[in-house]
Image: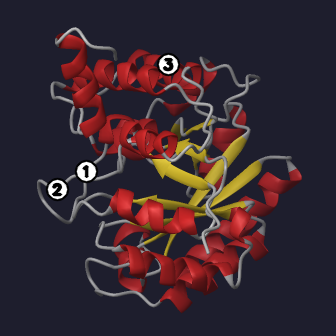
Amino acid sequence: MSRRPSRVTVVEVGPRDGLQNESDEIPVASKVRLITALADAGLPVVEAGAFVSPKWVPQMAGSADVLAQLPLDGPTRFPVLVPNDKGYDRAKAAGAREIAVFGAASETFSQRNINCSIQESLGRFAPVIAQAKRDGLRVRGYVSCVLGCPYEGAVSPHRVAEIAKDLVALGCDEISLGDTIGVGTPDAAVRMLDTVAARVPLERLAVHFHDTYGQALANVLACLERGVGIVDSAVAGLGGCPYAQGASGNLATEDLLYLLHGLGIETGVDLAAVAAAGRVISDELGRPPASKVARALAAGSRAGGES
């Protein structure tokens, strides 16, 4: 029996998870313009940046300047990624109201990505999350490689569930389950989700699918049928998959909204406005949006139809 929700919270990750993969420098003004446009389109959550070392992620170097120009008291939340105490202190000083920490369900990926084991990463996160909760900030926990790892292959759903449970125990308000390399299919996604939901309340779980093999929307639909009410996506499909050269990365927000609205699920988001924001940033990046819906809307506009 379907438990499809009547409303879904769309978490926009393009300005952080998407833009951090770009090779060319993106001005702070461009980031602020994009984030503001997405908030104005009605997106309730827009990732605004990351307080990580600019040596490793140069595109996130201006995150404090970005936050300083955002309407932090408005209806949209602007979480930022922090890797450690130092990053948290910088984020807090910049006015962040919500943070995110980033872990993995694969030991090898954890070592390659954040240079420590899974247990060591949880140890690093513990004081950061504890301080954030004392300061009254909301905390999101990301778990990557929930359906597959580029180094280890298949990942056990039980391992994902244990890590998600540990993050909640540390104080995370919400857990985003990420198919980092986009290898998942609907049945695998549902098995993983059901296993995690046996340990963590479903209302605290989000899904984050990459579209490397074209399965992201199918995976989202399968998880919607299980009752998931929070879905991550990136405007214009920003972001690539570093382990599958030339493959698409994040699920495009425009494509997700078209699906949700077609199912009669409320989002509070203006699809046309999101597509317009996606076209602007894509023009700045010198390429068309990866979103099929955005391209269809643009083609309809050129032909004289509605957009």
> Would you call the spot at circle 2 few (<14 residues within 10 Å), some (14-19), or many (20 or more)?
some
Between 176 and 301, the one lying in front of the other is 301
Q: 64 left or right of 132?
A: left
Q: The residue under label 1 is which amino acid type?
A: Gly
- Residue under numbered circle 1: 240
Query: Farthest residue toward the left?
Result: 246
**Kind of element beneath mark 2:** loop
Residue lying at 24% horizontally and 32% vertically, measured from the top left = 289
Q: In this picture, is 230 found above or below 279?
A: below
**Disc nearer the start of the sequence (3/1):** 3
State the separation of the CA atoms marked 3 and 1: 22 Å
Residue projecting furthest to the front: 1
Which amino acid type corresponds to the residue marked 3 in the rendered image? Ala
Mark toward the start of the polypeptide (1 vs 2): 1
**Residue that badge 2 annotates:** 247
Q: Secondary structure at mark 1?
A: loop
Q: Secondary structure at mark 3?
A: helix
